[in-house]
């Protein structure tokens, strides 16, 4: 068995406005960057996509999807008027189970979920739409525990990396998360969209600059304050997970796009590995 | 149907999926050996009462349909599907099938807009009802023979402040009351809330979730808080209740923060009649009570005086 490796690392947004409605032309820069990231990931010939989504919230530890073939139709609870998200993908069961095993060995509470009709979240499906539009690649999806902090997410990410290497997989690891989490609380038109606060915008850019410079340890240290100021999506903990999976605190992230989705911050970032 | 509709009763109707799991109804796939009987028996009392009151509709405000832009209202004639609880999928995989009272939904929407609120009608027929709505609806009326309307929890109490959130819910409550009156409906209201909301971060025994020897309220402090607010409800001390709820929320992370109780109290015009506490117990350490305000003429409570809070 060849040594496994992480072949790409990404931060991507997960709101459905980037894929629905299908004929929408709004937020073109984010869409195009997302497409580029997906194409780059596929060009690296991954065996599997590993996705941590902040929109899959868990309370009792983390959950990992172990349904062999999740399929159904998902309707977002906020943006149901944009359309439905049908899905049909395969899970890399071996990698999912090894990740669970290694996570539990590291002291985390991580459980499998294998239930017909278990809700697959919007972020996961938006990510798959760009990264695997032909439904060719198996997936490992995992939840965002609302109580977990830096240490837990780093451990969970490390368990992913270790499982990938142990099983000889080539994996793209994807943190599906927003940046600043303040948004418009009234209806807006697409062309009225902007980052809703100047502080949010400045702090998002500061965080992205640190990431672009490879100062990820500094970025992690700054994340709690960043989250407090900007209401960052799930305290930006997906970033910890991603760094745990990449196994590096100096990886440089190339910011392919940054912009608003309904006032919140969104970026597509690609990490060199 | 039009004319002088009315709210016949309001319930705090908590929604832990454990209650459905413990009951083993045919709609739910997982099987149990029981559990949480005291709360389930409390609901039993309400079921009979609701049947006797012959309501046209049950309105449920649920914290597990959290919306960012305004207050959302289910507005499709029928919703059907499999609802799997994302937190407790091993306990709750429920086949739901319910009629929605679309006229009622339209009326609430119109009145909410009239109050200056942002509101939306949820018209997607593939929408999956959240487990808060389903558990509360099932526990109040397992026959599902009364149409429902589900109202989302706008997250203003978390996004802005509790004060802003309460104001929103008072407006939504007023809007709901007017909508019911204009529609001619006899309505039951349900605030799908737990009380104290600190919980275990692990299931005591995942292989036997209904092991009641492991069940207890999170802390004595939380218990005392729950009893304090329940006592105020039992004594009809509405002013004191409203005054203490913010402190209660802060101290116990009470789920009433999500708005349902404030909405229901406002819709009922802040009743000062004694509420009936049908039962209280913990579920995975959270404090849960089934509480009823009977506003029916039969109970002699049909004419609440207008009050000044809203």
Image (cartoon, rainbow, N blue to C red):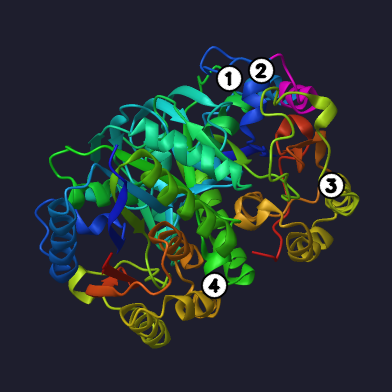
Asked if labels 2 and 1 touch by Cβ distance under 8 angstroms, the answer is yes
Q: Which residue: 15% across, 59% down?
A: A40
Callout 2 touching callout 4 (CB < 8 Å): no
Q: Earlier in the sequence, mark 2 or mark 4?
A: 2
Q: CA distance from mark 4 to mark 1?
A: 36 Å
Secondary structure under badge 1?
loop
Chain that bears disc 3: B
Identify the mark at residue B142; answer none if there is no mark: 1
Label 2 to label 4, Cα distance in Å?
Answer: 38 Å
Residue at figure coordinates x 12%, y 58% from the top left: A24
Mark 4 surroundings within 10 Å by alpha-carbon count, few (fewer than 14), some (14 through 19), many (20 or more)? few
Magenta span includes B308: no
| Callout 1 crowding tier (Cα within 10 Å): few <14, some 14–19, many ≥20 | some
**What SS does tag 3 mark?**
helix
Sequence-wise, which precedes: disc 3 or disc 2? 2
The residue marked by circle 2 belongs to what chain?
B
Residue designated by label 2: B23
């Amino acid at each position: 068995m060849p040594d496994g490796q992480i072949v790409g690392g990404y931060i991507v947004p997960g709101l459905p406005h980037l894929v629905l409605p299908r004929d929408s032309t709004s937020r073109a820069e984010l869409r195009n960057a997302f497409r580029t990231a997906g194409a780059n990931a596929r060009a690296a010939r991954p065996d599997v996509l590993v996705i941590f989504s902040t929109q899959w919230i868990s309370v009792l530890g983390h959950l990992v999807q172990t349904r062999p073939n999740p399929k159904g139709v998902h309707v977002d609870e906020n943006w149901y008027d944009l359309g439905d998200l049908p899905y049909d993908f395969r899970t890399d069961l071996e990698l999912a189970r090894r990740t669970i095993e290694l996570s539990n060995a590291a002291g985390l509470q991580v459980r499998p979920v294998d239930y017909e009709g278990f809700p697959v979240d919007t972020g996961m499906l938006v990510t798959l739409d760009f990264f695997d539009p032909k439904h060719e690649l198996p997936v490992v999806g995992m939840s965002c525990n609302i109580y977990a902090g830096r240490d837990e997410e780093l451990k969970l990410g490390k368990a992913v990396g270790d499982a990938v290497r142990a099983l000889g997989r080539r994996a793209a690891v994807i943190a599906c998360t927003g940046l600043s989490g303040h948004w418009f609380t009234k209806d807006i038109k697409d062309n009225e969209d902007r980052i809703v606060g100047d502080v949010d915008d400045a702090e998002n850019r500061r965080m992205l600059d640190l990431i672009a410079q490879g100062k990820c340890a500094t970025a992690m240290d700054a994340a709690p304050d960043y989250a407090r100021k900007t209401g960052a999506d799930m305290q930006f903990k997906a970033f910890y997970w991603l760094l745990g999976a990449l196994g590096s605190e100096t990886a440089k992230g190339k910011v392919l796009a940054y912009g608003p989705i309904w006032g919140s911050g969104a970026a597509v970032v690609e990490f060199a590995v | 149907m039009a004319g002088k509709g009315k709210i016949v009763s309001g319930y705090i109707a908590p929604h832990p999926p454990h209650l459905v799991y413990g009951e083993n109804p045919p709609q739910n796939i997982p099987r149990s050996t029981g559990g949480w009987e005291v709360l389930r028996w409390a609901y039993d009392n309400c079921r009979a009462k609701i049947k006797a009151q012959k309501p046209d509709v049950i309105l449920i405000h649920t914290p597990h349909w959290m919306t960012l832009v305004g207050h959302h209202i289910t507005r499709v004639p029928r919703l059907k599907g499999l609802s799997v609880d994302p937190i407790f999928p091993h306990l709750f995989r429920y086949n739901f099938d319910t009629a929605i009272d679309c006229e009622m939904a339209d009326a609430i929407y119109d009145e909410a807009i009239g109050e200056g609120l942002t509101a939306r009608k949820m018209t997607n027929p593939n929408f999956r009802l959240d487990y808060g709505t389903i558990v509360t609806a099932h526990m109040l009326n397992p026959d599902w023979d009364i149409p429902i309307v589900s109202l989302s929890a706008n997250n203003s109490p978390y996004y802005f402040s509790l004060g802003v959130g309460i104001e929103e819910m008072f407006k939504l409550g007023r809007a709901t009351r007017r909508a019911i009156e204009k529609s001619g409906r006899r309505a039951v209201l349900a605030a799908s809330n737990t009380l104290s909301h600190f919980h275990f971060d692990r299931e005591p025994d995942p292989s036997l979730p209904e092991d009641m020897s492991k069940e207890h309220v999170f802390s004595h402090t939380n218990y005392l808080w729950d009893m304090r607010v329940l006592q105020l409800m039992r004594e009809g001390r509405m002013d004191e209740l409203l005054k203490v709820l913010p402190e209660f929320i802060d101290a116990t992370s009470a789920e009433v923060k999500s708005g349902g109780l404030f909405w229901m109290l406002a819709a009922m015009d802040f009743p000062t009649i004694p509420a009936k506490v049908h039962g209280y117990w913990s579920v995975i350490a959270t404090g849960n009570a089934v509480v009823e305000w009977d506003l029916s003429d039969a109970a002699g409570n049909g004419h609440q005086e207008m009050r000044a809070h809203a």
